Amino acid sequence: MLIQLQIENVAVIEKANIDFSVGFNVLTGETGAGKSIIIDSINAVTGEKTSKDIIRTGASKAKISAVFGDFENDAINALTELGCDISEDGMLLLSRELSSEGRSVFRLNGALVPMAVVKQIAPILINIHGQHDSQQLFSPSKHVGFIDGYASLTDKVSEYRAVYKEMCEVKDMLLSLETDDELKERKIELLSFQIDEISAAELQNGEEDELLSRRDMIKNSGNLAESVSSAHSILNGDDRREGALSLVRDAAYAISQISEFDSEFSALSERANNVVYELEDIFSEIRAADGRFDFDENELDALEERLDLIFRLKQKYGGSVEDILLKLEALQTELDGITFGEQRKEELENKYKLLKERATAIAEEISKKRADAAAKLCEQIMSELNFLDMPNVKFAVEQNRVELKSDGCDQIEFLISANSGEELKPISKIASGGELSRIMLAIKTVLTDGDLTGTLIFDEIDTGVSGKTARKIGEKIRLVSKNKQVLCVTHLAQIASLADSHLYIEKKQTDDKTYTSVRVLDENERVYEVARIMGGEIITDATLEAARELILI
């Protein structure tokens, strides 16, 4: 059940701490006082889409916190399976913070959680019925959901949808294979030409860089050969000068002579000898390089031709050799898909057949369970409607077999006959606002009987009703509240007078600002509020006495 709701900077509510009790909680207040803000806040904290416009004017952020507790064991087990642990004191704290920049942060027992997690656990915590829910009765496509919820078919329908989705995907693949034969031949011819053109080039990753490097070397071969010759001459000497190697040897020898008489020169002598060895190695490699940069003129032409081929292929198939090779793989895959299309088509047809058989079997199983559930649902709903002063109403579920679709093979629509002797017709054609409210209350009562939801919220369930009928609705809600906590926003004294706890929502203006507060009424205040609802602005002793009698009934 919902134990406490804390609201900060939401619309006209600056700050409010609202305590709810077990049983039947009613919320009343003058029109525009902010009753809808309470429901909007509960919707927001349980993961419903919420605009940043909900933030109070002048505030940078809004925060809503809800404390839940007193869970049944089944609810605790269900929450645990969803990864939500109840605290040691048996409480669960859910909060949401909205910023003026549009950011939204959820916390579960203080830890950050994504909205998806909140939306998963929300149905276990709260079920909100508002005017929008009643409008769902006008949409036959929504009716199958009521049946599935009543029959506990959610998991089975999810299993079916997974198979149906895969079946549709395979069907789309089959359709893509059914192309025009002439177009297919032209495509095969083009792909084959492109594959042959790339394959014939025998490209290698990194090849272009090696070719460019080799070309640059050939173009600079004259300078390179001259540098090798120059280095050789400097190290070895020629007719005009003695080589550097010879001079360094002489220097090293001279230093070694000194080191024989002065030990301080020993290290220097060793270093000089090392220089000699290093220069000898360098000279050896320079000498070996003689002739390395003599190239065949035809090699440069071959390099240019190869680079030109790569350039043309890059223009057609990709910005690099690597891209061209990837393109080759893609072309080959596409060609294989067309070439082996018949084989692939046969495989897909077989797969589609198996998936359709499986989907059909699951859909028929679901359909049978829906039919069984529909008969029981109708019986229970008519019993509830009889209690709600609609004794002559006949409620039926029309179930027709259709082609497989996302929710099975059934077309389901709720039908009613509001008066004796009238034929059954779609709800949208004959139900009034008051009838819709009672029908939806009956459905909600049946669907939530025995489910895990701890708190039911009825937002203006009294639309279009008054008098004795309103009292009946109140009595039904009070009966429901014996097993579940109920929160009800109402404008009718007949309903408000039956509550276990009465919360009053009041709007005030201070310093040109509007504030809304929420407080639990004591017995005297409650009598006054019921009298206000009954009599309007002018409250007489007679009105107060009538309110007392209504509360005590």
Image (tube, rainbow, N blue to C red):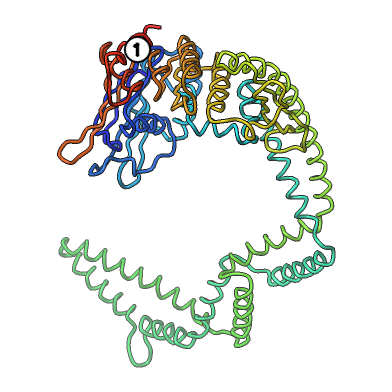
Counting from the top left corner in percent of width and height, residue 204 is at: 62, 66
Confirm whether residue 214 shows in the render.
Answer: yes
Dividing the picture into quadrants, the one containing residue 400 is top right
Left or right: residue 452 versus residue 328 is left
- Residue at 40% in and 70% down: 281
At x 72% / y 61%, what residue is drawn?
332
Q: Amino acid at mark 1?
A: Ala
Q: Quadrant of residue 146?
A: top right
Q: Which of these two is toward me, 95 or 383? A: 383
Q: Please determine whether, in this image, residue 172 is positioned above or below residue 268.
A: above
User: How many callouts does the rendering have?
Assistant: 1
141 or 415, nearer to the observer: 415
Q: Which residue ends up furthest to the bottom in the rendered image? A: 240
Q: Secondary structure at mark 1?
A: helix
Number of residues whose C-alpha sits closer than 10 Å to that of mark 1, classed few (under 14), some (14–19) or many (20 or more): some
493 w.r.t. 304: above or below: above
Q: Residue 23: horizontal and vertical position, in percent?
A: 41, 12
- Closer to the camera in the image, 333 or 405: 405
- The N terminus appears in which quarter of the rendering? top left
Give coordinates of residue 39: x percent, y percent.
39, 30
Name which quarter of the figure residue 522 lies in.
top left
Name the residue beneath numbered marker 1: 546
Residue, far top: 552
| Residue 432 vertical placement versus 353 (above, below) | above
Residue at 31%, 66% in the rendered image:
274
